[in-house]
Amino acid sequence: MLFGKPPSVLGIDIGTTSIKVVELQKERGGVKLRNYGEFFSPERELLPVKTSFISFFEEEIADFLKKILKEAKIETKNAHFSLPLFSSFFTIINLPLMKPDEIPEAVKLQAHQYIPVPVEEVVLDWSIIEEEEALFENKIQVLLVAVPKDVINKYVRIARLLGLSLKTLEVESFSEARALVKEDKRPTLIIDIGGRTTNIIIVDKGFIRLCHNLDFSGFALTRTLSKRLGISLKRAAEFQKAKGLKKEIGGLVRSALLPAIDKMIFGVERAMNTYLAQHPKRKIERIILSGGTANMPGLCDYISSKFEIKTEIADPFKEIEFPSVLEEVIKEIGPSFSVAVGLALAEFEKKK
């Protein structure tokens, strides 16, 4: 599927159960989908929960990506890669009010109190959060992110093996927020149910305020359904996709899935309440359901009813131009491509 001409940019999301690639280009004041591709290995379902494609050797990952790039006929070399949330450290720190040129050194001095590994072993990144309350108290709030150097180096080697020009490495939560929240300042909760874990992200006034990782996933639901109904994983996956939480006579699938989903919701509530306790004047105004499980029948409505908050399914391609013939496909894959889309959009964000 080749829709346009260069120049373009790639967003590459190396996830836990699949690798996704999106190619976008700037055109006539907007952004156009030029290409996309995904590599998924059924054998990944047999691997332990905490494993990821990034745990593979660089050469193997590069081979997987080569298959995507070749099949989709992608030629551009400019690429942005995602970093998994579970491989990074994320926190918000308060610093005394100081001159801008003093902040970098202050962040480095404070970082060791918050990062559970030696600072020398990580790459630090940070940004100032424009919080009026903190400035009123003569403080500066800083969003601090740290990623182990060995993880960074792995992605660098992958890009080199593919002959790609690595533009940025970005923790997936930031990419997802860019694609789904954009300029919206409302307190927004993103629930990204992936193949192996669930990421919880709170974005408020345009800044990420909280990132949390739950040991819950779409495959965990499949496994639960398989055990409770005594069916194969393949059959359970089919039921999960077709029936999900639909209210049906008998309702065996819904009944089997609800306990696990309620447990996930409890974990989300705990994370959300942690943020709201620190910001009592704020209130989550919308929820965005993302990840490969977002389209499961009935899930969006169920989460909306449990939280009593308007909930929507992620649509990262909402403001991106693509051929109308792809509308149904884009609707289906959209939630799981949120990170890849957000990564590619970073290229155009820099050029504003």
Image (spheres, helix red, strand yellow):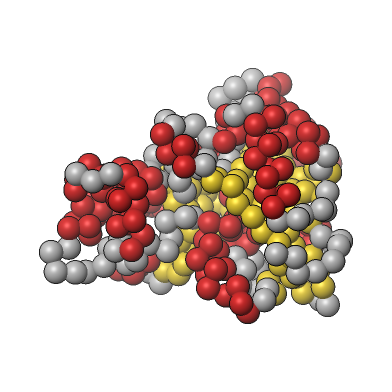
Vertical arrangement, residue 47 with respect to residue 278, above or below: above
Is residue 137 in view? no
Q: Is residue 157 above or below residue 128?
A: above
Give the side of residue 183 with respect to residue 86, left or right. right
Q: Where in the figure is residue 141, as x and y percent of width and height?
A: 64, 47
Residue closest to the eye, 316 or 99? 316
* Quarter of the picture holding the C terminus: bottom right
- Tell me where residue 173 appears, x and y as whole percent: 58, 50
349 displayed left or right of 250: right
User: How far across and down, in percent of the image, does residue 92 sit?
Assistant: 59, 43
Q: For this view, does 273 lie left or right of residue 243?
A: right
Q: Give the camera-side residue of 70 and 144.
A: 70
**Residue projecting furthest to the left:** 250
Tell me what residue is drawn at x 65 percent, y 35 percent.
Answer: 61
The residue lying at 44 percent from left, 32 percent from top is 47
Identity of the residue drawn at 51% across and 52% down: 201
Percent x, y for residue 292?
47, 55
216 or 124, nearer to the observer: 216
**What is the total number of numbered labels drawn onto the structure image?**
0
Quadrant (top left, top right, bottom left, bottom right) of the N terminus: bottom right
